[in-house]
Every structure is written in C-alpha cells, then in structure tokens.
C-alpha cells in the first residue's frame, strides 16, 4: 500500500474516531495502536509503553504540572479577584476602564497561570458580573474575558509554548521572551477596542435614555479617591513579586525552566498561605485536586499525541507530507499562509496541544527550509491557535464563559468574541510585516541565534 493511501487512511480514521465523541487522548492513542498492529512489526505493540515513556521523558515537560500548580494556587484563592479589583480602581476614570482592567488582569494572571481556561475562569468569575452590573452588554463582557483569557498561551510561562519548544527543539527561554512583545501588542489592541466599544455602547445608552428618567447603569459615573487607589496597590504587589521572582530566576540564569516552574509553584503557595491564610489541608485540597486533574488530562493528551506522531513518522506519513509540500515549490509566504490556514481549520476541532504535536513533524521542516525563524513562527502559530480558543465550533474559552455566565446567550458570546478574532488576525499580519516585534527581545537578552 502506498504512503499516500496509508496517510489518507490514518487521517480519515482519526477524524472518524474524534467525531464519535471519544476523548482526544484516547482517540489518538487508539488510532495509533490500531495502525501499529496492521502496518508495523508485531513487536511494536510490545513497546507502546516504552515509546510513550521515552517521548515524555523530557525535563522540559516537567514544567507543565508545576506551572499548573502555580496557576491553580492563584485561581482557587481570592488572589485573582483582588488583582482584578485593584486594576479596576486605577482604571475607573478611563472610558471603558472596567473593560481595560479586565484585559490587564487577564494579562497579569496569564503571566502567572500559563493556561487560557484558568485565566478565563479566574478573572471572568469576578469581571463579567461587574461589567454587566455597570451596564456593559453581555456579548462585550464575554468577549473581553474570552479574548483576554487567550493571552494565557502567549505570555510566559505558556504551557503551549513549552510543548512547541519540545516539538521544534527550540530554546524555551528564547521562545518565552519572543512571546512578550506580541503579547503586549494584543493587550494594547484589546484595550483600544474596549475603549471604542464602550464609547459606542455609552452613546447608544445616552440616545436611548435621553427622555427616560431611569438612568442606564453604563451612564453612572463611578469615582475613586486617591486614598482608595493607593489602598489597592498592596493587592497587586504580591503578583509583582511572584512574577519578578520567576522571571529573574529564569532569565538571570539562576534556574532552568523546570526549576523555575517549581519555584513559581512554591512562591504561589507561600503567597496564598501568608496573605490569604490558605495553608490548611482542607484549603489546599481543591488546589491540589485541580492541579492533579488538569495535569493528568494534559499529560495523557501529550503522551498519546507523541505516540500518534511516532507512528506517523514510522509510516513515513509526516516525511511524505513534508516532501509533497516542498515539491509544490510555493513561495515562502504562500507556504506560510497555507500552513496557517491549516492551523485555523484544525483549531475548529482540536486544542492547541494536539495541533502542535500532530503537525510539527509535517510543517516545521518545510518552514525551516524556506528560511523562516522557528522561534518567530512559534509565536505566530500560538496567536493563530489562540483564535481557535474563541471561535466556534469548539472555542474552549467560549464554553468556559458559558459556565461562568450561563444567562448570556451563546449567540451573544460568539458575536462578542469575533472582533477579537479579527484583532488577532491583524496582529499576525503585523508580525509578518515587522518580525522584530517578536525577535527583538530574545535577541537583546540572549543574543542573535546561531545559524
């Protein structure tokens, strides 16, 4: 049987099993094992566990459960709400300041949690009710939180970037640094949109209620004194200490990424114990349970995805696909565009973890041959996968929002997130036109990459 036929069967079987509703990890593992049985030596089945173990025996992957622990410690305590409240006090006088506060809170929380759903849940549980209470439309409130949550896989420490670094065999520290510039760019774009959208809703409310004595909540003018502003600063200080400690340890050369993840987890536990009194076993139970569940789920997906990629490579499917792409002799930008469209389509059905581990063996060799910087491409690919978190039909963050605010119709949530999808697409175009947005900081801190 030709490689093309085997590849089509492999892809078709994968889609069919996933369409059945089977969990992604089990679907990938089942397809891999079946094809090992029929198309690989019989002894291959005896080495399934060994192959999975060898693929996952990476010290870099150790950082994932430790970063999840750090995020759970912040998300399961009152720390996330305090961060949001402090930012709201300082942003109160800016038009749309509440929306901007939520964007900034998502960005800061994402820089500590490394997970989009965790960011979305922690900030949204406080932010969405507050925005709606002050007259923001349900779609606007949902869109701000859903889009802000996507920053969790772009700003360091990003679990998605850890996986990309492993798959692409690139420097994790350089990749983390490369995500900061684009992350700040997205924060700026989201904040600008929040101001413009707020003004539109404010003007609409003024027109609608001009002759009505009942004032719309969005028309209220909430004021905070300087004493209230400075009184809120101590709520932010612990986050600054935590974030600074992790970054100094990582980029100062004092610790490896995995050691930094452990340090971040310890600092987060110390923070919630000393400030919020979360140290008793009954308090730590939900944090450890959440960490164990999310880590187990994620590591199972990673292990099965790696096994899936191993079988794909053994059957020469990935190599043949890469050679076919190269043989098409597309210009480098057409090649990049085609690959990003593929990632967008996959984002309709798959989470970022699976997309990276399934496509890396196929798309990275042609991109490298075309002269693209794989660190830069990792950031671009991450933003494109972020779009998959907030557009249907999967849109993981959309379903997180539905759990937080079930009274907001799904239609309003989707329409509220679409402008942010367009902003992300605009950011990708900017990165293509000005790659230094991503590459400047890693080159400055770690020097130019060796060719």
Image (cartoon, rainbow, N blue to C red):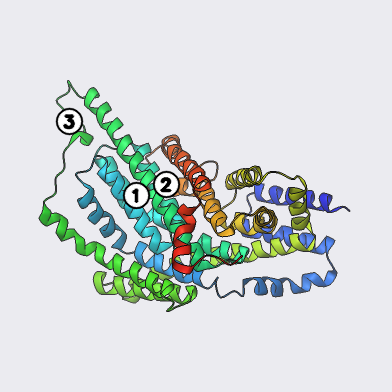
Q: From the image, tell me which residue sits under label 3.
A: 215
Q: Which mark is residue 103?
A: 1
Q: Residue 65: image x %, image y %?
A: 49, 70
Tell me if label 1 and label 2 are in contact, CB under 8 Å: yes
Mark 2 or mark 1, which is nearer the start of the sequence? 1
**Crowdedness near tag 1: few (<14), some (14–19) or many (≥20) residues, C-alpha within 10 Å:** many
Quote the CA–CA distance across marks 3 and 2: 30 Å
Which residue lies at the image location 75% right of the left edge and 74% below the top edge? 47
Which residue lies at the image location 48% right of the left edge and 55% below the top edge? 438
Q: Does residue 157 appear anywhere in the picture?
A: no
**Crowdedness near tag 3: few (<14), some (14–19) or many (≥20) residues, C-alpha within 10 Å:** few
The foreground one among 58 and 126 is 58
Q: From the image, tell me which residue sits under label 2.
A: 147
Quote the CA–CA distance across marks 3 and 1: 27 Å
Q: Residue 203: image x %, image y %?
A: 25, 28
Mark 1 or mark 3, which is nearer the start of the sequence? 1
- Tell me: residue 187, above or below residue 236: above
The foreground one among 62 and 155 is 155
Mark 2 or mark 3, which is nearer the start of the sequence? 2
């Amino acid at each position: 049987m030709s490689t093309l036929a085997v590849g089509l069967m492999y892809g078709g079987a994968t889609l069919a099993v996933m369409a059945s509703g089977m969990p992604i990890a089990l679907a990938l593992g089942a397809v891999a094992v079946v094809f090992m049985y029929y198309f690989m030596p019989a002894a291959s089945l005896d080495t399934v566990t060994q192959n999975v173990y060898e693929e996952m025996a990476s010290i870099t992957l150790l950082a994932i459960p430790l970063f999840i622990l750090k995020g759970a410690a912040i998300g399961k305590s009152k720390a996330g709400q305090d961060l949001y409240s402090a930012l709201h006090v300082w942003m109160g006088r800016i038009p749309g300041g509440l929306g901007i506060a939520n964007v900034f809170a998502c960005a800061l929380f994402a820089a500590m949690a490394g997970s989009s759903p965790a960011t979305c849940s922690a900030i949204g549980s406080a932010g969405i009710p507050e925005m709606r209470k002050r007259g923001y439309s349900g779609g606007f409130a949902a869109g701000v939180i859903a889009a802000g949550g996507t920053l969790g896989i772009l700003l360091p420490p990003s679990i998605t970037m850890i996986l990309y670094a492993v798959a692409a065999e690139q420097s994790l520290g350089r990749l983390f640094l490369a995500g900061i510039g684009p992350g700040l760019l997205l924060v700026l774009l989201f904040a600008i949109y929040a101001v413009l959208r707020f003004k539109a809703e404010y003007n609409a409310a003024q027109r609608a209620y001009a002759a009505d004595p009942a004032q719309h909540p969005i028309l209220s003018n909430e004021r905070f004194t300087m004493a209230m502003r400075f009184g809120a600063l101590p709520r932010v200080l612990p986050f600054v200490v935590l974030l600074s400690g992790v970054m100094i340890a990582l980029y100062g050369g004092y610790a490896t990424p995995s050691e930094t993840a452990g340090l971040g987890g310890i600092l987060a536990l110390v923070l919630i114990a000393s400030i919020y009194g979360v140290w008793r076993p009954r308090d730590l139970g939900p944090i450890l349970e959440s960490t164990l569940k999310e880590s187990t789920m994620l590591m199972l997906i990673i292990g099965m995805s790696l096994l899936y990629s191993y079988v794909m490579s053994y059957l020469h499917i990935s190599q043949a696909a890469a050679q076919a792409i190269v043989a098409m002799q597309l210009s480098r930008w057409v090649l990049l565009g085609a690959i990003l469209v593929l990632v967008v389509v996959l984002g309709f059905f798959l989470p970022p973890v699976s997309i990276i581990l399934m496509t890396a063996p196929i798309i990275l060799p042609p991109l490298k041959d075309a002269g693209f910087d794989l660190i830069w491409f990792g950031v671009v690919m991450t933003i494109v996968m972020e779009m998959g978190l907030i557009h249907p039909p999967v849109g993981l963050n959309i379903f997180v929002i539905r759990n937080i605010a079930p009274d907001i119709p799904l239609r309003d949530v989707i329409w509220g997130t679409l402008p942010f999808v367009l902003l992300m697409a605009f950011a990708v175009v900017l990165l293509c036109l000005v790659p230094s947005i991503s590459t400047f900081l890693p080159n400055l801190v770690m020097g130019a990459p060796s060719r």
